[in-house]
Image (cartoon, helix red, strand yellow):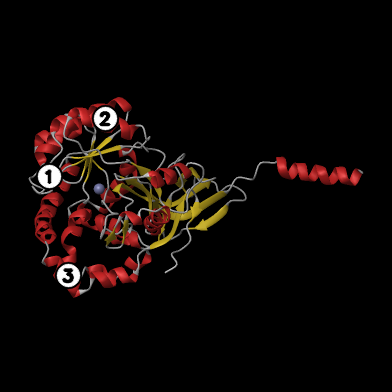
C-alpha cells in the first residue's frame, strides 16, 4: 500500500510540475539586432521561444542547463520580414484556382522560411485557408513562415460600394487592408479617388492600416496627404517630390519598394542569371529553373503583349531605385517588400535578390537589413514582437556563416533558421 502511494506520489509530481523552461543560449557571435545596432561577441538567451536577454558575452550569464549554440565567427540576425508578399494560387509558372489549397499555401510558407524569411504579410487575395494558417500560428511557433493577411483586395468604382466592400473585408478580421490605385500602364481602370477615400476612412475607423498599391507619383502623394500610412510599390513614373516626402514624414508612414516585382515582368525574356544557382534550388524545383532557361518559352514571351509591358516596367525600375534612395535619405521608413507569390516571383529566393537591389540603389547593407527586419515588422504594428533581437521579441533568428554587413549577398550563407526558438529542419533538396 505504502509502495503504491509512493508510486502515485511520484506520478503526481511528474504530472504537476510544470515542464522545465526550454532555454537556449547563442554564444560568441556577432549580433545584428534589426534596429541598426551591432554587438560583437554577443550572447543571446532564448527562453521558451522568446528572447530573454541579449548583450556582450562578458555581461550576459548563460543560465544553468541552457543548450549552448556556439556562434563564434558567425552572425546572428532577426529572421527576414517581408512586408509585401503573397500566398497565391500558383505552382511555379502556372496559375489557377485549383492551386489555392492548404497544402500549397503551406509549401509556399515553407519556401519562404527555407530562405530565412520567417514572416510574410500577404497583401491581398487571401482566402479561408490563409486565415486558418494565421490563426494556428498563434498557439505555437510554426515550422514555416508566420503569415498575416489582408483578405480580398478592395476595388470598387463608387464610395458607397467601397464602404460596403471594406466593411465586408473588415468582418473577416484581417491584419490589414489592401487597395489598388493603378491603371496598369493605361490598360485597366483605376480605383477612383472618391472610392479609395471612402475605404481609407473605414480603415481608420476600424484601426486597420491600409496598403495602397500605386504606380504614379500623383496617386501616392494624394494618398500620403490623406493620411494613408502604407505605400505598396515604388513610385515609378517620376522622381518623388518634396510634397510627397513631407506628407510621408508627417505621418511616419511606410514605403515598400518591391523592386523585384519589376524584374519579374521582363527577366524571362532571356535566361535569368539564377537559373543555375544552387541557392534557387534550396526552396524551388529544378524543373522551374529549366523552364526559365527554355528558349522556346522565352521566344513566346517576347512575342506577347506582356513583354511590351515588361519593357516599360524595366524603365520604371530605374526610377524606382532612384526613388528608394531619395525616400530613405528623407528619413521615411522603408518597409522591405518583394511582391513574391504570383507566378514567376519566387518566394524566399527573390527576397535575397531584393536586398541586393536595395544596396545597388544606394542603401548600405545595414540600412537594407534594418528595412527587412525591424522596420518591416514595425510598419505592420509588430514592433518589439517580430524583426528584432531584443528581450520580449519572438526568437525568429538566422545564423549566417558570413557577415552580411561586408556583402549583402552573405544573407544567403544560411547556417540555421529558428522560428520561435525552434530550429527549422534543413531543406531536403
Ligand atoms: Zn502585391
The kind of secondary structure element at disc 3 is helix
In percent of width and height, residue 235 lies at: 14, 45
Marks 2 and 3, the one that precedes in the sequence: 2
Q: Which mark is residue 278?
A: none
C-alpha distance separating marks 2 and 3? 43 Å
In percent of width and height, residue 103 lies at: 43, 56
Residue drawn at (30%, 63%) of the image: 92
In percent of width and height, residue 148 lies at: 37, 43
Locate residue 221: give its quadrant: top left
The residue carrying mark 3 is: 298
Q: Are marks 3 and 1 in contact (CB under 8 Å)?
A: no
Q: Can residue 210 be seen in this view?
A: yes
Crowding at mark 1 (Cα within 10 Å: few <14, some 14-19, many 20+):
some
Nearer to us of marks 2 and 3 is 2
Nearer to us of marks 2 and 1 is 2
The residue carrying mark 1 is: 183
Mark 2 residue's CB less than 8 Å from ligand 1: no
Q: Is residue 113 left or right of residue 160?
A: right
Whether residue 132 is situated above or below residue 96 in the rendered picture? above
Residue drawn at (11%, 56%) of the image: 309
Mark 3 residue's CB less than 8 Å from ligand 1: no
Figure quadrant of the C terminus: bottom left
Q: Which mark is residue 164?
A: 2
Amino acid at each position: 500500500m505504502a509502495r503504491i502511494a509512493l508510486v502515485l506520489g511520484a506520478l503526481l509530481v511528474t504530472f504537476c510540475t510544470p515542464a522545465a523552461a526550454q532555454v537556449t543560449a547563442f554564444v560568441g557571435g556577432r549580433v545584428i539586432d534589426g534596429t541598426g545596432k551591432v554587438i560583437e561577441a554577443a550572447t543571446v538567451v532564448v527562453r521558451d521561444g522568446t528572447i530573454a536577454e541579449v548583450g556582450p558575452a562578458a555581461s550576459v550569464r548563460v543560465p544553468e542547463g541552457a543548450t549552448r549554440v556556439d556562434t563564434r565567427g558567425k552572425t546572428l540576425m532577426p529572421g527576414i520580414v517581408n512586408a509585401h508578399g503573397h500566398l497565391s494560387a500558383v505552382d511555379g509558372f502556372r496559375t489557377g484556382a485549383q492551386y489555392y489549397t492548404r497544402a500549397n499555401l503551406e509549401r509556399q510558407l515553407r519556401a519562404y522560411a527555407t530562405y530565412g524569411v520567417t514572416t510574410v504579410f500577404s497583401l491581398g487575395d487571401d482566402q479561408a485557408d490563409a486565415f486558418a494558417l494565421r490563426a494556428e500560428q498563434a498557439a505555437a511557433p510554426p515550422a514555416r513562415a508566420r503569415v498575416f493577411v489582408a483578405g480580398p483586395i478592395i476595388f470598387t468604382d463608387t464610395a458607397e460600394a467601397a464602404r460596403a466592400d471594406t466593411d465586408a473585408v473588415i468582418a473577416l478580421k484581417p491584419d490589414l487592408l489592401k487597395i489598388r490605385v493603378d491603371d496598369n500602364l493605361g490598360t485597366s481602370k483605376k480605383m477612383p479617388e472618391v472610392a479609395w477615400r471612402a475605404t481609407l476612412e473605414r480603415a481608420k475607423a476600424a484601426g486597420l492600416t491600409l496598403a495602397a498599391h500605386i504606380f504614379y507619383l500623383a496617386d501616392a502623394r494624394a494618398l500620403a496627404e490623406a493620411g494613408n500610412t502604407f505605400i505598396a510599390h515604388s513610385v515609378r513614373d517620376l522622381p518623388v517630390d518634396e510634397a510627397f516626402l513631407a506628407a510621408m514624414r508627417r505621418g511616419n508612414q511606410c514605403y515598400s519598394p518591391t523592386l523585384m516585382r519589376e524584374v519579374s515582368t521582363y527577366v524571362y525574356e532571356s535566361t535569368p542569371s539564377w537559373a543555375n544557382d544552387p541557392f534557387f534550388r534550396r526552396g524551388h524545383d529544378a524543373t522551374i529553373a529549366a523552364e526559365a532557361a527554355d528558349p522556346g518559352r522565352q521566344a513566346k514571351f517576347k512575342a506577347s503583349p506582356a513583354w511590351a509591358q515588361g519593357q516599360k516596367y524595366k524603365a520604371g525600375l530605374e526610377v524606382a531605385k532612384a526613388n528608394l534612395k531619395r525616400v530613405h535619405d528623407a528619413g521615411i521608413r522603408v518597409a522591405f517588400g518583394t511582391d513574391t507569390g504570383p507566378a514567376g516571383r519566387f518566394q524566399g529566393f527573390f527576397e535575397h535578390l531584393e536586398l541586393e537591389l536595395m544596396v545597388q540603389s544606394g542603401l548600405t547593407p545595414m540600412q537594407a537589413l534594418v528595412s527587412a527586419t525591424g522596420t518591416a515588422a514595425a510598419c505592420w504594428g509588430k514592433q518589439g514582437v517580430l524583426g528584432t533581437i531584443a528581450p520580449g521579441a519572438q526568437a525568429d533568428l538566422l545564423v549566417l556563416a558570413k557577415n552580411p554587413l561586408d556583402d549583402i549577398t552573405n544573407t544567403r550563407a544560411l547556417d540555421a533558421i529558428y522560428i520561435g526558438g525552434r530550429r527549422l529542419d534543413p531543406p531536403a533538396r
